[in-house]
Image: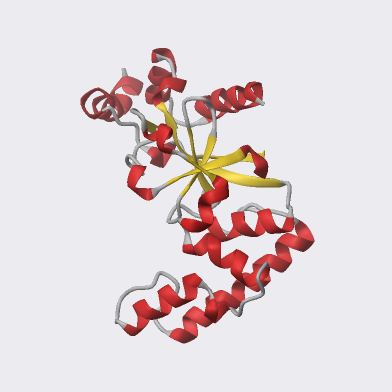
Amino acid sequence: MISYLKSLPKRLDYFLFNKISSKNHIFNLKIDKNKIEYFLELKNIIDKKNFIWDGDWDKNKISISKYRKYSASYNSIYEIYKENKNYNECEEYMIKSRLIFDGKKSGRGENLTELNNYFNSIDKLKNSLDQFGYKSQLELNNNKKNDEIGVVIGRHLEIIKLQDKFGGTHRFALCKLLEVKEIIVSVKAVHKSLLQKEDIKKIITMNDNEYITSLLKKKIEISK
């Protein structure tokens, strides 16, 4: 009875709003970076607070080969480290510096000094990835354990990179350029069709995410 009462808010959220909070169910997964063959534009993201996404959002996925055209953050890593541009000439820096000059939030610093420091820090990230490979946030003593490369899982078990603002875009680009094989992704949501009614019932009633993590890991392994 006590467990039922504890799960009641989750039950109401799901049956009234078709929603299961992502807060308690996001999990991390170590994968081959080449498993990420697609990305999803921000406009097609359903609800970052919901772990289960219904509908045809995954049909709007785009080949990762086109990601540079959609992401200044991703493109800028290639500009700096493949095309040898100075960081203050790359697309992201120019966008962020204009925001700062206009008195708006840039997301990378409140002034040019902070913006420059941020881009200098990318050099340190690159050197670390090159020397040690991809390290999880926990290994780096970062308390934000789910601040890995943000992805969602589509109906065919495809692992889809989320377009920026979900973590790890610079890291992902650097791993591609440096040919770092294994990365860690943070699964933010999954397509509803991957779960049976019994699965959803267990997710709602259980207090941790071990069940869904194990379930999805097995499905992904089978799909390799």
**Considering depth in this image, is 72 or 50 the residue closer to the camera?**
72
On the picture, is 154 further left or further right than 110? right
Measured from the top left, where is residue 203 in percent x and y?
42, 24
**Considering depth in this image, is 26 or 34 the residue closer to the camera?**
34
Q: Quadrant of residue 188?
A: top left
Residue 22 appears in the picture as rendered: yes
| Quarter of the image that includes the N terminus | top left
Q: Quadrant of residue 177?
A: bottom right
Q: So how many labels did they put on this image?
A: 0
Q: Residue at x 38, y 22 (%)?
A: 205
**Considering depth in this image, is 212 or 43 the residue closer to the camera?**
43
Outermost residue on the left side: it is 16
| Quarter of the image that includes the C terminus | top right
Q: Residue at x 40, y 20 (%)?
A: 200
Q: Is residue 139 above or below residue 55?
A: below
On the picture, is 25 further left or further right than 37? left
Q: Quadrant of residue 84?
A: bottom right
Residue 144 appears in the picture as rendered: no
Q: Which color mode does the image show?
A: secondary structure
Q: Is residue 127 above or below residue 205?
A: below
Q: Residue at x 28, y 24 (%)?
A: 11
Measured from the top left, where is residue 216 in percent x and y?
55, 26
Q: Residue at x 56, y 75 (%)?
A: 119
Measured from the top left, where is residue 6 in percent x and y?
32, 28
